[in-house]
Image (cartoon, grey):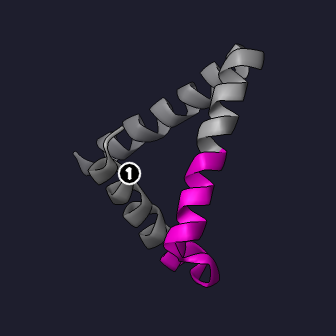
Amino acid sequence: MDEQQVRKDIEMVVNYLKIHQPENATPEYAAAMLDFLQTNLHDLAQNDPEQLLNLYESFKADKEKEHRSKN
């Protein structure tokens, strides 16, 4: 992943944290959170692919619900 995309991802997480956990809304915390999520998703894919599929299906259902509510 290129550096510009990493900065953009960190900025997006900081914005999320400003709403949900303002005390942790720092670039350092956001970067650590992204690292944690990446590592845990990788571990989940390696050790429990069925659970990863369930997580994906939940994500997909949320996105479809969001799409329907916009139309």
Tell me which segment is drawn in magenta.
Answer: 17-36
Q: Which residue ends up furthest to the left in the rendered image?
A: 71
Q: Quadrant of residue 46?
A: top right
Q: Which residue ends up furthest to the front in the rendered image?
A: 3
Residue denoted by label 1: 6
The quarter of the rendered structure image containing the C terminus is: top left
Q: Residue at x 62, y 30 (%)?
A: 55
Question: Closer to the camera, 31 or 14?
Answer: 31
Identity of the amino acid at label 1?
Val
Q: Is 1 rendered above or below residue 42?
A: below
> Where is residue 44 drawn, in percent x and y?
71, 26
Label 1 packing within 10 angstroms: few (<14), some (14-19), many (20+): few
Q: Quadrant of residue 67?
A: top left
> Where is residue 9 drawn, in percent x and y?
39, 54
> Where is residue 70 drawn, in percent x and y?
26, 50
Q: Is residue 45 magenta?
A: no
